[in-house]
Image: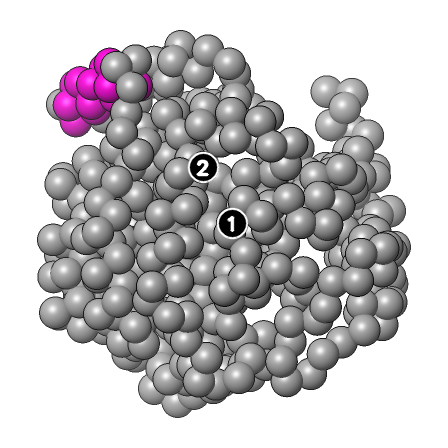
């Protein structure tokens, strides 16, 4: 999508700040945070900016160490490109486009799309949910590319890959990254297919981030993923670190910062290797497929509109999920409009699935409600 004059001015301003920031990150990061806050005139990022500022100022915390890692461990060109695509394009500029599409159509529009290029994997990890898909499903490259072009038209520039193992399609990943140079891409990977050549591709493209998944150290990882997997993953990490491509990140339990459940297109959705458009990577039910519907038609489908109409599912944002935290909410939505299970191997009745979560949800609600009440009093 072409940028407006106003968007180009905003982009140029942030790029100038980035160059200034590089001269002294420790001193200038707070200034950058302030600049982003001033440019966020609609306060779309108010809660996120507050958390980032507080995290950076706590110099004993993990988040401050992660900020430092961005400058100590990452190639300058890669950091610059990721910042431009992630902060400027995907967030400061395109959030406004997403908001316009959302208001015009009365539906959710995601900030990020999680997509499975393939269901196949070179490992067979114990308990992996992806193993339930058919082994040889591949999302055709033309549909994969179409998803991104459609998403960009609605303001979505962040694309995450899962699977299966996404890197079984390294050649297609490189093609997509090159064609959509204004987007940011990442892949959840077991790292065993990362070699010198692919690392060089990453360094050249600058808009792709591998997110390496391990269980812990060697004993824990090999016991689940197979003997020798940990050593191969470590070798991949060493390659990435040598090329200044590896940094650490973490996420979870962010419901209170994003006001509840982010699924159903509110902030993200999932498209599996069969093309089924699911509200969440852990909610294998759908009433739309990218082979038959456009993204916008899926956003306005009966199931996704149930998410739009019912979010948040709980005013306690420590209990955001309609399945894990609020059993019965998902089954109500599925039953109301008849969405089908997308598990092609073992379709599961949504009421049976929901029942499995009741005990854990009850136990967590006792703790979560107490914590939430305490936070509201602070």
**What span is colored magenta in the figure?**
7-22
Residue 371 in the image: state x and y as whole percent. Answer: 77, 37
Q: Residue at x 76, y 76 (%)?
A: 348
Q: Residue at x 13, y 70 (%)?
A: 196
Residue 298 in the image: state x and y as whole percent. Answer: 59, 51
Q: Secondary structure at mark 1?
A: helix
Q: Quadrant of residue 8?
A: top left
Position of 289 relative to 51 (above/below):
below
Disc 1 + disc 2, Cβ < 8 Å: yes
Q: Secondary structure at mark 2?
A: loop
Of marks 1 and 2, which one's residue comes earlier in the chain? 2
Residue 251 in the image: state x and y as whole percent. Answer: 51, 48
Q: Residue at x 25, y 33 (%)?
A: 84
Label 2 sits on residue: 154
Quadrant location of the C terminus in the rendered image:
top right
- What is the C-alpha distance between the residues marked 1 and 2? 9 Å
Decide: few, some or many residues near mark 1? Use Cα within 10 Å; few <14, some 14-19, many ≥20. many
Q: Residue at x 33, y 67 (%)?
A: 141
Label 1 sits on residue: 295
Q: 235 or 357: nearer the eye?
A: 357
Position of 248 relative to 126 (above/below):
above
Q: In the drawing, what numbered circle is on residue 250?
A: none
């Amino acid at each position: 999508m072409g940028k407006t004059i106003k968007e180009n001015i905003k982009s140029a301003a942030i790029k100038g700040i980035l160059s200034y920031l590089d001269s002294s990150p420790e001193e200038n990061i707070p200034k950058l945070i302030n600049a982003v806050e001033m440019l966020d005139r609609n306060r779309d990022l108010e809660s996120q900016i507050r958390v980032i500022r507080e995290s950076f100022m706590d110099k004993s915390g993990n988040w401050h160490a992660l900020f430092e890692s961005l400058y100590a461990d990452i190639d300058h060109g890669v950091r610059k490109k990721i910042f431009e695509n992630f902060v400027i394009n995907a967030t400061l500029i395109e959030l406004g486009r997403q908001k316009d599409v959302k208001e015009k159509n009365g539906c959710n529009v995601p900030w990020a799309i999680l997509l499975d290029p393939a269901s196949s994997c070179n490992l067979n990890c114990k308990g992996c949910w992806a193993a339930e898909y058919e082994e040889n499903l591949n999302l055709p490259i033309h549909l994969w590319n179409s998803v991104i072009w459609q998403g960009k038209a609605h303001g979505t520039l962040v694309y995450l890959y899962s699977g299966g193992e996404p890197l079984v399609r390294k050649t297609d990943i490189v093609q997509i990254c090159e064609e959509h140079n204004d987007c940011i891409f990442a892949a959840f990977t077991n790292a065993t297919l990362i070699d010198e050549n692919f690392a060089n591709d990453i360094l050249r493209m600058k808009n792709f981030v591998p997110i390496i998944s391990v269980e812990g150290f060697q004993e824990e990882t090999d016991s689940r993923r197979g003997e020798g997997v940990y050593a191969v993953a470590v070798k991949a990490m060493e390659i990435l670190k040598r090329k200044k491509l590896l940094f650490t990140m973490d996420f979870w339990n962010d419901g209170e910062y994003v006001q509840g459940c982010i699924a159903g297109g509110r902030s993200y959705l999932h498209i599996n290797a069969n093309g089924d458009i699911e509200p969440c990577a852990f909610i294998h039910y759908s009433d739309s497929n990218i082979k038959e519907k456009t993204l916008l038609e899926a956003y306005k489908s009966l199931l996704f509109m149930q998410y739009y109409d019912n979010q948040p599912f709980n005013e306690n944002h420590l209990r955001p999920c309609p399945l894990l935290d609020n059993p019965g909410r998902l089954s109500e939505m599925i039953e109301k409009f008849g969405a089908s299970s997308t598990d092609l191997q073992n379709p599961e009745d949504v009421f049976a699935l929901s029942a499995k979560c009741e005990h854990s949800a009850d136990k967590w609600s006792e703790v979560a409600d107490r914590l939430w009440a305490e936070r509201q009093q602070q």
